[in-house]
Image (cartoon, rainbow, N blue to C red):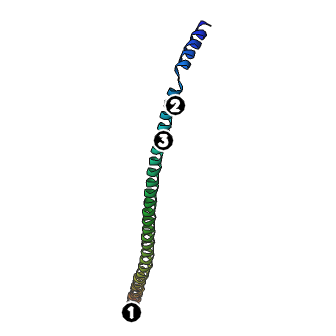
Amino acid sequence: MAQLFVYGAIMEAVRDAWTDERLDDLNQRVDTGFTQVDSRFAQVDARFAQVDARFAQVDARFDKLEERLENRFDRVARDMRDLRVELRSEMDDRFGRLEGRFDWLQRMMLAAYLTAVLGFIATRI
């Protein structure tokens, strides 16, 4: 309880020490401080506007890059499709020629076999 009395006495002394002139001075300093804070917030807002503008530029660059990449991937896919068609056609041609060779080889082997059989028969008659 004694502490509360001492604290109350101190606060009473401090309250008496605050004159109107001192309060007006404090009020002026608080207003000046808030004006400075407002000014700094305005500067921060301006910086954020610059950052937003910069991000818009970066977004535009990424959009262009994305479009270029999509175009290139489309071109690569088209080239691969064309190459696949060309390769398939070339393979079909080569396999067709190879089939022809096998057919020719089969006929030759058949002819050789028939010749051998006829020769064998001829030597036995």
Between residues 125 and 55, which one lies in front from this camera angle?
A: 55
**Neighbour tally class for label 1: few under 14, some 14-19, many 20 plus, Cα within 10 Å:** few
In-image side of 83 versus 10 (left or right): left
Q: CA distance from mark 3 to mark 2?
A: 16 Å
Task: Name, please, the residue furthest toward the top.
Answer: 2
Q: Label 2 sits on what residue type?
A: Asp
Between tags 2 and 1, which lies in front? 2
Query: Residue 32 placed where, x, y %?
Result: 47, 38
Which residue is under mark 3? 35
Q: Label 3 sits on what residue type?
A: Thr
Q: Secondary structure at mark 1?
A: helix
Q: Secondary structure at mark 3?
A: helix
Task: Check the image and report above or below for 99 versus 2.
Answer: below
| Mark 1 vs 3, N-terminal side | 3
Which residue is under mark 2? 24
Q: Could you say which quadrant of the image residue 76 lies in?
A: bottom left
Which residue is under mark 1? 122
Q: Label 1 sits on what residue type?
A: Ala
Between residues 6 and 18, which one lies in front from this camera angle?
A: 18
| Mark 3 vs 2, N-terminal side | 2
Q: Secondary structure at mark 2?
A: helix
The residue sitting at 41% across, 86% down in the picture is 100
Q: Could you say which quadrant of the image residue 10 lies in?
A: top right
The residue sitting at 43% across, 73% down in the picture is 75
Between tags 3 and 2, which lies in front? 2
Q: Could you say which quadrant of the image residue 124 lies in?
A: bottom left
Query: Residue 19 placed where, x, y %?
Result: 53, 24
Query: Residue 72 placed where, x, y %?
Result: 42, 70
**Neighbour tally class for label 3: few under 14, some 14-19, many 20 plus, Cα within 10 Å:** few
Between residues 25 and 3, which one lies in front from this camera angle?
A: 25
